[in-house]
Image: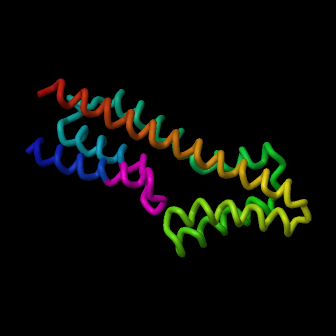
Amino acid sequence: MSLLFLVLSTAVMLTGLAGVFLPVLPGVPLVFAGALIYAWSTGFQVITVGNLIFFAILTAVSSAVEYVGGVLTARKYGASKYGLIGGVLGGILGLVILGIPGLIVGQLAGMILGELYFGKQMKESFTSGFAMFVGYILGSTVKVFFAGLIVIVFYIKVIGAL
């Protein structure tokens, strides 16, 4: 029975790992959910409550960094609210039209257009757009690292219990 739950947990975690790169899936939360399924199925004997708390903290931090990383980085470099709104709308529109590359290009273009609308010069607009892009990359790096860390700790614990 625990093998069935291990397979299910692995499938959920693999979906989560895909979600780290595909913005339509909640990446790290799905990786956490996979660990939670297995922990529950084994009575928290292999993956303990302490492990789950650690995984939950990583999940919360990665979600926070993902959602505010680009915005805070852009704000640090002087982005206006119009630039931020443009970045979000451009990212959504780009994702719908071109998929993942469109998300990145759309965020950048939306930020620049929002800044130009606000009245900033082209150079300032590009600086804000680049800052949002850097924040997005940093947030994505944190997501990849934390999702990988959860998976590695999970399988070290599971393999060690076999």
Image location of residue 104, percent across then percent down: 59, 59
Image check: 34 left or right of 93?
A: left
Q: Which residue is the extreme one toward the top?
A: 160
Name the residue rendered at 60%, 72% in the picture. Answer: 93
Question: Residue 147 sits in which quadrant?
Answer: top left
Q: Which residue is the extreme one toward the bottom?
A: 97
Image check: 142 left or right of 39?
A: right
Question: Residue 32 sits in which quadrant?
Answer: top left
Image location of residue 23, percent across then percent down: 48, 59
Q: Which residue is the extreme one toward the left?
A: 1
Q: Which residues are magenta?
A: 15-30
Name the residue rendered at 72%, 45% in the picture. Answer: 72
Q: Quadrant of the C terminus?
A: top left
| Residue 20 inside the magenta-drawn segment | yes
**In the picture shown, does residue 151 fall above or below 92?**
above
Q: Quadrant of the N terminus?
A: top left
Name the residue rendered at 54%, 75% in the picture. Answer: 97
Q: Main secondary structure of the magenta part?
A: helix
Q: Nearer the viewer, residue 116 or 84?
A: 116
**In the picture shown, does residue 38 fall above or below 115?**
above
| Residue 73 inside the magenta-drawn segment | no
Image location of residue 90, percent across then percent down: 66, 68
